[in-house]
Image (cartoon, rainbow, N blue to C red):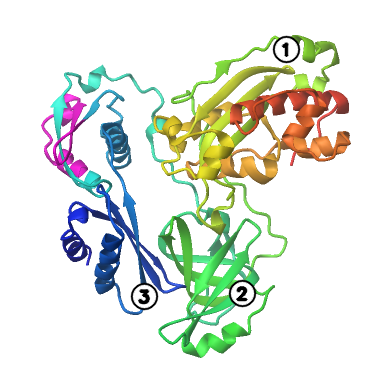
Amino acid sequence: MNDSFIKELRTAPDFSSAILSKITLESDKMSATLHIVTDKSYTYEDENFALTTARKYVPDAFSCNVSITKLTPDCEMVAAKLNTIIAENYKALSATLTCDDVKVEKTEDGFSFTVFVISTYSKDENIPVLLANKLKTCFCGNFTGKFIDSGRTAEDLPADDDNEENETYVMPIRSFKIADFNAIDSAEKAENAIYISDLNFISEKVIICGTVTDIRERTYGKENNKVYFVFSVNDTTAATRVTYFPRQKNVERTRGLKIGDGIVFTGKTELFNGYLRFTANAIDYGKVPENFVPEKRPSKPVPKNYFCIKPEPFSDNAQTNLFDKDYIPDCLKENSFVVFDLETTGLNSVASSGNMDKIIEIGAYKIENGEICRSFNTFVNPQCKLSDEIIKLTGISENMLKDAPTCEQVMPDFFKFCSGCILVGHNMANFDFKFVDYYCSKLGYVLERRIIDTIALSQELLFLSNYKLNTVADHFGIDFNHHRAADDAYVTAKIFIELIKMKKSLPNTL
């Protein structure tokens, strides 16, 4: 279907080099959207032509839409994508390259790239072709490439004394024994269910079990005469949504299920619109064991070295006056704290509710012996477009992020920076911690949940009209550039120290 559609689409002059970047299917709405990328300006008539052409290749049962993006890449954009493709698909090769080893030039009909490689890869002719083909799925135009011997050998590379940093870490999947199983669909008894909080992988067979918190019945088909159900379910470790298409004989029985029932779902997981979707092919009765206490997830070890972002020593002359050491409580001197703030692409901090938003900036400061002593500040490339609202709110542009490290590169270093420390932030528990916990855990790093939220602390100790960060800062006479992570984190650190000086003890961590 893809090749035939593109061949016909390219008969239009303005789509002569267009590509089909992806197809989005929404089964609950029975709709299909074809995402087209072109490097030429297009007209309203071109858009209609694309929609008419797409309609020929989409099944009649689905409504049909097209989304057209005009994208004219430059050499830097292609080089960044090429580095990402190599890192994702050829890890051993990527480990031998530096940022100066990939060169891209514009040609009449596209781009040509050269990768300067160690002698081991210099005669490989297959990988450049595969890389060019992958680039063609991302950008319009023709791509060619070659490897050239850089003159370096494997012996010339820096010694790697920390092998575990380059090993893929597989997060252990935890499970519990299902209680009170009673079959509805299944011929065999389901013995164990995995934690919903560990449901972050694609599999053809997965079993989960939990309490139903919501049930929705929906219809599909040409005459809307078929039904399916969407369940929200919680097993105390996390919550998720489950789509279930019942056999005809089980429709009425499914309608009889209610909120509060314990259900076992057997099905598969797949990526859909950027997040993981669970579709059940069987449901049965079953419960989370009584007095269930989730097993603590083991963490990947703290990295031995910083690899991407290294903390900087920090000193502020204002601390000499603002934080009189004679008045600093022992609880501040005896513990280490990391105060941090994030800027993100949006407010969605719950992965199971949809496409988790991305981190675009981390600002963090370490407090030791009652003083702010080290900083960890970086932009993070989200590898997606920013909304106008976020650009306006934060002052962060896509150009500022294009050369920044990715979240996968930053989080091991941030995890090391936080190791052994109590985490502090303003609205930390409800927002910032959820992001770093999610993106750390994807890499196998489990943050210790010792959190102090300065909102709760301010509410306990101060009497203000509200407890927004700028309001609390005004109370202490602190000026700052709000909605930038480094500034917000530094001000929060100063506020935290002042609040603990007032309280003279640490609050309970969350």
Viewer-closest of 210 and 495: 495
Q: Which residue is mark 2?
A: 215
Give the residue furthest to the front. 44
Q: CA distance from mark 3 to mark 2?
A: 25 Å
Q: Position of residue 177 (x, y in %)?
A: 59, 64
Residue 292 relative to residue 402: left or right: right
Q: Are marks 1 and 3 in contact (CB under 8 Å)?
A: no
Question: Closer to us: mark 3 or mark 2?
Answer: 3
Q: CA distance from mark 1 to mark 2?
A: 56 Å
**Residue 62 - label:** 3
**Dot 2 amino acid type:** Ile
Report the magenta residues as a range: 105-132
Please rate how many residues cluster around mark 3, counting C-alpha atoms within 10 Å: few if below 14, some from 14 to 19, many from 20.
Answer: some
Residue 125 relative to residue 363: left or right: left
Q: Which residue is mark 1?
A: 318
Asked whether the viewer can see residue 415, the reply is no
- Quarter of the image holding residue 11? bottom left
Q: Position of residue 185 (x, y in %)?
A: 50, 81
Please rate how many residues cluster around mark 1, counting C-alpha atoms within 10 Å: few if below 14, some from 14 to 19, many from 20.
Answer: few
Identify the secondary structure beneath mark 2: strand
**Dot 3 amino acid type:** Phe
Q: Position of residue 437 (x, y in %)?
A: 58, 42
Viewer-closest of 296 and 152: 152
Question: Closer to us: mark 1 or mark 2?
Answer: 1
- Residue drawn at 48 percent across, 54 percent down: 200
- Quarter of the image holding residue 274? bottom left
Q: Is residue 454 above or below residue 18?
A: above
Q: Is residue 360 above or below residue 63?
A: above
Q: CA distance from mark 1 to mark 3?
A: 64 Å
